[in-house]
Image (tube, rainbow, N blue to C red):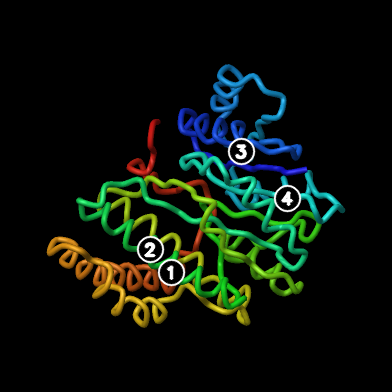
Amino acid sequence: MITIIITSYNEPKATIRAVKVFLNQKIKQKFKIIVVDPFPEVGEFLQREINDKRVEFFLDPGEGKSYALNILFQENFSDNKKDIFILTDGDVYVSENTIREIIEEFEDPKIGCITGRPISIDARNTKYGYWSHFLFSGIHKTRKKLSKNKKFFECSGYLFAIRNGIIQEFPLETSEDAIIPYLFWKKGYRTNYVERAEVYVKNPTGWKDWINQKIRNIKAHENLNKIAPNMPRTKSFFNEIKEGVFFILKHPKTINEFWWAFQLYFARLYLYIQALKQIRSKQKYSDGWRETEINSTKPFD
C-alpha cells in the first residue's frame, strides 16, 4: 500500500490540484491519499469536489506538521517494508510520473528514503524568481552528487518518500525532512535523490515572506545540533559559503542575474545572523502551522 500524505493550511483550491495530480498517476499499486489540514472547511470542500474513496481527510489538531505526521505514521504503520509513505504539501504539485519513479527506486532494499526535485514555477526575470531558481539549482547539484556517492543528505519537504515499517515517530523540535532521513541512516538505510520525480513550487515574491520562510528553516536545522549532534550536515552556513562563491560565478546568465546573485549572497548572510539572534534570545523553532503567514507562496487561495 502506498499512503500519500498531503499537508496543507487552508488552501483548498491548491490542495485539490495536488490531489488530482496523484489520482491521475498511472500505476497498478494500491494507494490512498490523506489530506491533513487544521481547517474543517478544507475537508468539506474536498468532499464536494472529489468523489473518490481513495481520498481521506484528517483534521489536524493544530499542534504542527510534525505532530500530525507522527499520528498518521502510527495509524498507518505497516509491518510490510514494501509499503511506502509519500509526503508532500498542498501548495505544490508533482509530475505525472512521480509515484512510478518512487516505486522503482524502492526496489532496492537498501533505500529507506527518496527525495524528489523541487522546480520553481516563478519567472526567472525577477529578483525573487531568480533567487528561487538559483537556490533550487544549488540544492539539485548538491543532492545529485551526494546521492551518486551514496552519502547522507537531507530530503526536500516539498516531496519525499520513506519506507513504511521502519519508524513510527520522530522528534518534533526540527523539520521532518531533516530528521527522518537521519533516523533511517542510523538504521542502515540510504537516501536516494530521484530528479525525475519533480515537484513544482511557488516561492515567496517579497522580502518579508522570503525572510520569514528562510529564517524558520534555518532555526529548524540549528536544532539538529541538540537532537542529532552526530548527523552529517548538508545544510549549514559554512557549506553555503564554500559552495556559494563558485556557484555565483557560474549560474547567472545576464547582468541582472549577476547583480541578483550578489544580493542573494548577502541576503543569506543576513538571514543567518537574524536566525542565530532569535535562537540566542530563546526564540526557538516552532512547528506551529505557519505562525507567520506566507501569502505569496499560495498559488490559488
Q: How far apart are marks 3 and 2 (CA)?
A: 29 Å
Q: Distance between the residues labelled 3 and 4?
A: 17 Å
Tell me where residue 142 appears, x and y as whole percent. 46, 71
Name the one closer to the observer, 248 or 144: 144
Of badges 3 and 1, the one in the foreground is 1
As drawn, the residue found furthest toward the top would be 48
Q: How crowded is mark 1: few (under 14 residues within 10 Å), some or many (20 or more)?
A: few
Q: Is mark 4 on a helix, strand or loop?
A: strand
**Which three-letter amino acid code belongs to the residue tagged 3?**
Val
User: Which residue bears the numbered disc 3?
Assistant: 36
On the image, the x and y values in percent for residue 26 come to: 64, 36
| Residue under pointer 2 | 137
Question: CB of mark 1 within 8 Å of CB of mark 2?
Answer: yes
Q: What residue type is labelled 4?
A: Ile
Q: Which of marks 3 and 2 is in front?
A: 2
295 relative to 283 in the view: left or right: left
If you read the primary sequence from the N terminus, does the residue marked by circle 3 or circle 2 appear first?
Answer: 3
Q: Residue 84 carries which label?
A: 4
In the shown orientation, is residue 79 left or right of residue 58?
right
Q: Is mark 1 on a helix, strand or loop?
A: helix
